[in-house]
Image (cartoon, helix red, strand yellow):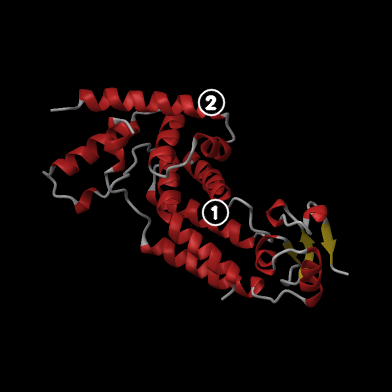
Amino acid sequence: MSRRADIIRKFYEQHRQGLFSYALTVTGDRSRAEDAVHAAIEKIIVRPILPLNLKLYAFRCVRNAAVSAWRKNESRRVDYFELESLPADSPDCWRAERVETALAKLGDDEREAVTLKIFDDLTFREIAAIRGANQNTVASHYRRGIEKLRELLAEDKP
Amino acid sequence: MNDVEKELKIITRRGPSAGLDARVERSLQNASPFFSRPVPAWACALSAAIGIASGALLFHQLSRDNFGGVKTILVTSNDVTPSSFPFIGRSFVHP
């Protein structure tokens, strides 16, 4: 096996969760999200030269593939969390469900900024590069998203 | 980190299925003959002459033809060393 394939494999193992979650954020559908991640990895594999910033390139590829999949998808409700692994009446399950519902109520730009920043620890600069957007715009989507989430989660408290 | 960020961080996210892992692995296996072709002597000699680390050369300065052969070496800003500096941005094509 070539060293190059090993690099891509290691990269995938390290970022599979992040790439998948991001694709899920955009497509709203598990199987389309997996297709988008696979398409991104294939794109990296066939490139003659590996990009200098593999992480940013992969997230950008996932975004492009996921956006085309999203256009075909009606549903916007996303199953982000492993709810089946939690007891149905546990506080963890309740918390995950209400966060999921709140995330679904954000605008697409806000949801993308929030999930990439919080789940994948990307900087505003990196998110801006992935989305082809301005860094300040991304930061403002993020802040607005967090504010909305705070309000939605406060409304929903027992 | 604020309260909302903390709340989101602690929830276990849904991961991709084993099916995706298998698809990616298959793609890597199918692609590997293309990339496992050795770097030819001319490329190794050139990289040594201009001071590019041979490990780096394997990964991103090469463009390959349809059969996996090395066609071009591009010296990028990743390769900065005192001796390679004058060559940054230059391409070297198969002689």
Q: Chain of mark 1?
A: A
Is any part of residue B67 visible from this angle? yes
Q: Which residue lies most toward the front here?
A: B82
Q: Earlier in the sequence, mark 2 or mark 1?
A: 1
At label 2, the amino acid type is: Asn
Mark linked to residue A136: 2
**Residue B2 location (% of width, % of height):** 31, 30
User: In the rendered image, which quarter contains the N terminus of chain B?
Assistant: top left
Query: Which residue is at 43% across, 64% downward?
Result: B21
Secondary structure under badge 1? helix
**Residue B87 location (% of width, % of height):** 82, 55
Drawn side of residue B69 relative to residue A28, left or right:
right
Drawn side of residue A39 relative to residue A86, left or right:
right
Query: Which residue is at 17% across, 39% downward?
Result: A94
At label 1, the amino acid type is: Ala
**Residue B24 location (% of width, % of height):** 49, 64
Query: Which residue is at 57% across, 59% downward?
Result: A42
Same chain check for tags 2 and 1 = yes
Q: Is residue A74 above or below residue A110?
A: below
> Rounded to the nearest whole Å, what is the CA distance between mark 2 and mark 1?
27 Å
Is B3 in front, or is A77? B3
Q: Quadrant of residue B83?
A: bottom right
User: In the rendered image, which quarter contains the C terminus of chain B?
Assistant: bottom right
For label 1, the residue is A40
Secondary structure under badge 2? helix
Q: Quadrant of residue A50?
A: bottom right
